[in-house]
Every structure is written in C-alpha cells, then in structure tokens.
C-alpha cells in the first residue's frame, strides 16, 4: 500500500511468487507480468538520455498490446539468466541513435552494457500527458540483480490482463482473495496492496475533465456577461451622443426598423471583431504554451466557427436594448438635443 511519504516504491509485499500464483491458480487471468520501474541514464557514444525504465517479463507486451516496430522482444530465457538486453521506446531510440538503426547496437546503463533487441512501436502520450515512448524495457531479473543493486526481490507492481472484459471484476475479486491469503492478512485487516482498474482510472479522468469543463464554462460565462454589459453600455453612450443624428434620420423618413438594424449591426460588428481577435490570441497562446511545455496542441475547427457565431449572438442580445431605445426617441425632441 502506497504511503504518503513512501511513494510508489514503498511497498515491499509483492513478490515473484505472487505473480506465479496468479498465473497458475486464477482462471480469469490471461497474462501477468512483474513490474519494477524507475529512472536511469542511458549512454551511447557521446549521447546520453535520462528516461523511465520498466523491468518486466515478455508477457508485458501482450498485456499492454504493444507492438514492435523493429527487431524482437527478449525471451523468457533472457529473464531466467538476467541477460543484458533491452527494448527501446521511440523517443529513447531517437535521442540515443538518431535516425540510425538501433537493433543490435549496444548502450550503457549504469555500469552495465546492454544489447538492443528491438524498438517498440510508437504509443504517444498517456491520458495524464506522459510520453509513453520515453521508456526502456528490460528483464525484471536484470533490473533487480544488476541495476538496483540492493538485493531487493520485491516488485513495484504486478500487471495483469483478464481473459475477457466480462471477467475483469471477477479477476479483481480473485486476486484480492489470493493475495490476502498469501500475505496472511487476517479478516478485518486492511490489504497491504491496492488494485487499480483501468476503467476506474478512466472514469476518474472523465470526472476530472467534466469538472474542469464546468469551471471553464463558468469562467467564460462570467467573461461573456461582463463583456456583454460593456458592449451594451458602449452602445447606450453611442445612442446618447448621436441623438441629433437619430432625430434627423427619423425626421426625413427613416423607419424605426432601419434605426434598430443600424445599432444592432454596430453592436454585432463590435462583438465580432472582438471575438475574432480573441480567437487569434487564443490560437497564438495555445501554440506558444504547447511549444514551451512540449504539449501537442489541437484546435478543433468547430471552435473556430462557433466562437465568432457566439460573439454575434452576444452582440445581438446585448445590443438589442440600445437599438430599441434609439427607436423610441421623438424626432422633434431629438433634433433639439444638445
């Protein structure tokens, strides 16, 4: 169980025996792989790169549905003998070898030399924005014996895949029961492990995105309200300053409809130009932030269409009252206005 101070590597109760028991005893589990991870420095020639590593078994690729772009995965035999072999993510391959072929090349991790057996297919960013291609995959036994160097035999995680989607909930219950039994946890005591279900993580992310969306909508609504009131006040001042002009137009035969349309058009144009300027500033800021932080930015075409249309709607809504007030002026009184 992860403590506040110990972090994700504070748990020392999971072992390879747990993995073997899950594989052999649970019918709802299709594959299971141990996982030990952390960060390390990869060096080749005059290039080096700090990246995330995972120590796993060959089943990891099937569990994560991760294909290979080049070469081949390491084998169970490599795991048994703690061989110095590894798989590279696309980001690591690019930073270490550039455009050159990576398969068969050697690189140094800590004080050990490793042979690259394969390059993983690109995965892109995860749901929380991490670069999944910035990784090195190694046999877990190699990590435990040669990289960590502390004699620790526990695992950080055990990654599993169920036989089918329908069996997922049953698999969680079976794993919980099995691990409590193996870890000799008495009834009523808390588990010394936790099980994370991908769908639960996705639901939590969706809920967080929904909350953020509501917050942004609230902020945007307040901004639109303030902006709309500002537009209305500007148009009311315009009506007051142009009272004689309005009176003259009414006196020579202009209809109230023509006066109303005139001021509505001015309000709409004012909002439209403001909306277009806001869209332009938003696009520039998005790309600047994306370039600075290394985030991919995607601006949907719908936003570029909806934003000006919404600005027009704000202009019509908040410009209607000043336009209506202009049509209520008496021509004679308006002509006498100073």
Image: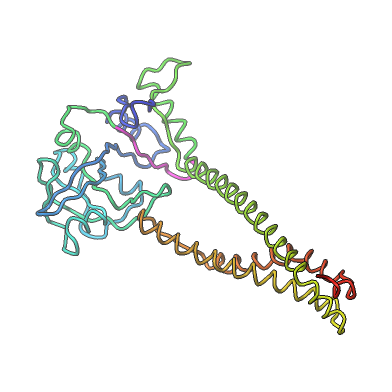
Between residue 219 and residue 178, name the one nearer to us.
219
Residue 269 locus on image (x, y percent): 65, 72
Residue pictured at 55% horizontal, 43% vertical: 207
Residue pictured at 30% horizontal, 33% vertical: 156
Residue pictured at 25% horizontal, 43% vertical: 53
Work out which quarter of the rendered image holds the C terminus and state it.
Answer: bottom right
Instruction: Please give left or right for residue 47 compared with residue 292 in the image.
Output: left
Residue 158 locus on image (x, y percent): 33, 35
Residue 6 locus on image (x, y percent): 33, 26
The colour style of the image is: rainbow
Instruction: Please give left or right for residue 162 compared with residue 107 in the image.
Output: right
Work out which quarter of the rendered image holds the N terminus and state it.
Answer: top left
Between residue 297 and residue 158, name the one nearer to us.
297
Q: Quadrant of residue 298?
A: bottom left
Q: Is residue 71 above or below residue 271?
A: above
- Magenta residues? 156-167
Residue pictured at 30% horizontal, 45% vertical: 60
Between residue 299 and residue 185, name the one nearer to us.
299
Q: Is residue 50 above or below residue 177?
A: below
Residue 180 locus on image (x, y percent): 40, 22
Query: Total of numbered circles in the picture?
Result: 0
Q: Quadrant of residue 237?
A: bottom right
Between residue 284 and residue 23, name the one nearer to us.
284
């Amino acid at each position: 169980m992860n403590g506040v101070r110990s972090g994700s590597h504070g748990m020392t109760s999971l072992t390879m025996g747990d993995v073997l028991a899950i594989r052999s005893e649970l019918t709802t589990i299709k594959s299971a792989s141990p996982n030990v991870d952390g960060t390390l420095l990869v060096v080749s020639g005059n290039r080096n790169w700090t990246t995330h590593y995972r120590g796993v078994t060959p089943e990891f690729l099937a569990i994560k549905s991760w294909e290979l772009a080049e070469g081949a995965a390491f084998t169970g035999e490599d795991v048994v003998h703690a061989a110095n072999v590894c798989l590279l993510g696309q980001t690591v391959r690019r930073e270490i070898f550039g455009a050159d072929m990576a398969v068969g090349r050697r690189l140094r991790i800590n004080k050990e030399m490793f042979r690259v057996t394969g390059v993983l297919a690109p995965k892109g960013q995860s749901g929380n924005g991490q670069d999944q291609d910035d990784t090195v995959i190694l046999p877990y036994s190699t990590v435990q014996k040669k990289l960590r160097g502390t004699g620790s035999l526990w695992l950080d995680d055990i990654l599993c895949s169920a036989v089918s989607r329908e069996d997922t909930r049953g698999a969680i219950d079976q794993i919980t029961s099995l691990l409590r039994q193996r870890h000799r946890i008495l009834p009523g005591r808390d588990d010394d492990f936790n099980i994370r279900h991908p769908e639960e993580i996705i639901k939590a992310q969706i809920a967080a995105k929904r909350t953020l969306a509501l917050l942004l909508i609230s902020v945007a609504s307040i901004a639109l309200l303030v902006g709309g009131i500002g537009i209305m006040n500007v148009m009311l001042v315009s009506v007051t300053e142009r009272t004689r002009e309005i009176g003259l137009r009414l006196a020579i035969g202009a209809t109230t409809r023509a006066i109303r349309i005139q001021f509505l058009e001015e309000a709409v144009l004012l909002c439209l130009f403001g909306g277009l300027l806001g869209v332009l500033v938003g696009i520039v800021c998005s790309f600047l932030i994306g370039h600075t932080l290394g985030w991919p930015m995607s601006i949907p075409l719908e936003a570029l269409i909806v934003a000006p249309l919404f600005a027009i709607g704000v202009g019509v809504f908040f410009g209607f009252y000043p336009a209506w007030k202009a049509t209520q002026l008496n021509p004679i009184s308006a002509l006498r206005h100073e």
